[in-house]
Image (cartoon, grey):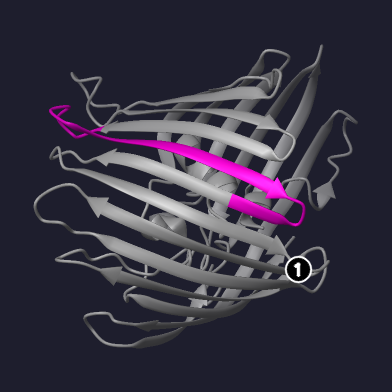
Amino acid sequence: MQKHVISAVALAVVSLGAQAQSSLTVYGVADAGLVLERGGDAGAVQKLGNGVASSSRLGFKGKEDLGGGTILTFILENGYSIDTGAAKQNGALFGRQALICVTGEAGALSVGHQYTPFYKTLNNVADPFATGMAGNAQNIFDDTTRVDNTVEYITPRFHGFSADVQYGFGETAGNSAANRYIGASGTYENGPLTIALAHQQRDNATASAHSRNTMLVGRYRFGDVTGHLAHACNRDVLGSESHDTMLGVSAQMSGADRLFASVIRHHDTTSAQRNAVQAALGYSHALSRRTDIYAAYGHIRNSSTAAFHVGTAADTGSGTTGVNLGVRHVF
């Protein structure tokens, strides 16, 4: 459901009234649940979790038809903690998204604080948990979600193919490569089949080294059952390499019930052998078109000195076992 949340700016439209070609959409997510964590260094934790299945948010999307098939939009999206009312993303006013975009026949060009192509591929295609609950793929896979100072171009879809290219300026005086981000993805969709390839590279503060991640994803719908497969090759700024492999499934059990599960293996190719395996199971029941209740269980087995934690959509977690029970409302 969270993959729909990212693009759920079509809900609750409020007309500006001045021009029929302009509109303002107010949208958001209110998500809270009980979170139980075991296996952390500080001991067991029981808490009221914020943004367990989907991070809580309040957003505004403006749209204006400029004519000739060209549309200008902007998105300003704030993240908040529903359990305390505090702002997320280190207190940034619009720390989730802040962008302006021009869309036409040639595609979409946007600038601002935006989701990365790698994250969108992981969230929208690869992960049956849609990077939420205890089964969140970002517990293991790279967790870079959004980047500042980006320019992004998304092509129109042509015979099932589309591409997404993003460049993030490091904005370091005298060194244009320092803190730079480069990301891209290509997607092919044909009926029940989706195949996607995503890549990203991040330079360090001196541009003396960079990390990179390359991920190949396949998804296929067999009626009410969808299979997910993803494999990522990673290299950090120190040159250490690792591989992440995920096998997942989601099933629409009835009109309101959905079951999903995944297994993820992290393989460290260095001599340290910091390997890990995550297994997770989740369930959601739709009370209405906008509201669902959910439950999830996730467990990570770390090897050697690996220190992966079971988190949620808005929390990195503290233990190796997590249990979630909550409710989510999209407005």
Q: Amino acid at mark 1?
A: Met
Across and down, in percent, residue 75 comes to 62, 40
Quadrant of the rendered structure where residue 321 is?
A: bottom left
Look at the numbered disc 1 and give the secondary structure of its residue: loop
Count of number-bearing discs: 1
Segment colored magenta: 203-227
Q: Is residue 324 visible?
A: yes
Q: Residue furthest front?
A: 222
User: Is 41 rendered above or below residue 105?
Assistant: below
| Residue located 54% across and 71% down the image | 281
For disc 1, the marked residue is 253
Across and down, in percent, residue 114 comes to 50, 38
Left or right, residue 84 beside residue 8: left
Across and down, in percent, residue 52 comes to 53, 70
The residue lying toward the viewer, choosing from 269 and 71, is 269
Quadrant of the rendered structure where residue 154 is?
A: top right
| Residue located 12% across and 28% down the image | 208
Q: Where the N terminus falls, by quadrant?
A: bottom right
Residue 32 included in the magenta stretch of the image: no
Count neighbours of disc 1 (C-alpha within 10 A) and say few if under 14, some if 14 to 19, many if 20 or more: few
Residue 218 included in the magenta stretch of the image: yes
- Name the main secondary structure of what is drawn in magenta: strand
Left or right, residue 317 beside residue 330: left
User: Is 148 rendered above or below residue 168?
Assistant: below
Left or right, residue 27 beside residue 218: right
| Residue located 69% across and 62% down the image | 251
Quadrant of the rendered structure where residue 198 is?
A: top left
Q: Where the C terminus falls, by quadrant?
A: bottom right
Across and down, in percent, residue 183 comes to 41, 29
